[in-house]
Amino acid sequence: MTTQRLAGPVFDFHARLVKRPGAVGQLLSTMDSCGVDRAAVSAGGIVDLDRLSRQIVEGGQVCGDADNAAVLAGCAASGGRLLPVYFGNPHDTTGAYRAQAGLFRALELSPAVHGVGFDDPRIGALVGVAEAVGHPVYAVSVVAAGAGTADFVALARRFPGVPFVFGHCGFIGIDIHAINEIEPQPNILAETSGCFGAVARYAVDRLGPDRVLFGTEYPLQHPTVELAKFAAMDLDPPAWRQVAWHNAHRLFAEETP
């Protein structure tokens, strides 16, 4: 797969590592082939796609933990190119996350996987730990009670000092309504993997390029697909550099080279 290279470095804010032999090497090789320099990664494979897609529509939950240890080990072997994201489990206490938070760089929450909404006190407790250690929080909304975009905005409003990342620009690929819902809450940024190009462009125009993050959802989506989406937008170079590089480093409190 090939696509026109966009100028400048690229930070993928949303990729996954599945625990299998060679996963780290395959991810890094894919990044090299596409011109992706760094990535934030969280655990994948917590639930199979058939069950996940069913849970998104019909409800349901998985109570088990993600393999955060495998993510941590994989990132340690990447020479600083992969940044570990802790996949929080609201069915567990906050103790595990609190004990390991210093080893990770962000928190991911998933109502689609764990079946717990943003209005649940257990979610608030996890975000409280993220606030204490300076982690941004990534999540994707679903249509279940307590887990929609309005609920996500309400959670962000409760923690104004925490940067929240709204995954996939919404619940569906054309969720313009969701972009409008998050726009008034300044500590929410939108991540663009999986949404239509028109929606990603709308997010840049409505929120401003300083509130949009490039992501891929690798390995479910090949980076060339997401890069082609942005190449077709023909963003001006400063806006692309903001989306593809500076914003991620700002959230991770790192200087941008």
Image (spheres, rainbow, N blue to C red):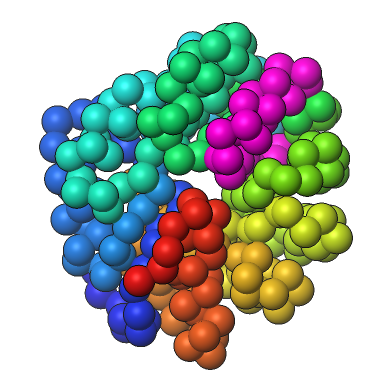
Residue 138 visible from this viewpoint: no
Q: Position of residue 223 (x, y in %)?
A: 35, 61
Work out which quarter of the rendered image holds the C terminus and state it: bottom left
With 129 as the anchor, is 42 left or right in this view? left
Using the rendered view, name the quadrant where residue 72 is placed: top left
Position of 44 relative to 257 (above/below)? above
Q: Position of residue 143 (x, y in %)?
A: 76, 36
Q: Position of residue 105 (x, y in %)?
A: 45, 40
Using the rendered view, name the quadrant where residue 210 is placed: bottom right
With 91 as the anchor, is 44 left or right in this view? left
* Range of residues picked out in magenta: 120-142
Position of 167 relative to 72 (above/below)? below
Residue 86 visible from this viewpoint: yes
Question: Is residue 134 located in the magenta-colored stretch of the structure?
Answer: yes
With 92 as the anchor, is 244 left or right in this view? left
Work out which quarter of the rendered image holds the N terminus and state it: bottom left
The residue located at (42%, 64%) in the rendering is 255
Position of 100 relative to 243 (above/below)? above
The residue located at (32%, 32%) in the rendering is 71
Q: Position of residue 253 (x, y in %)?
A: 50, 54
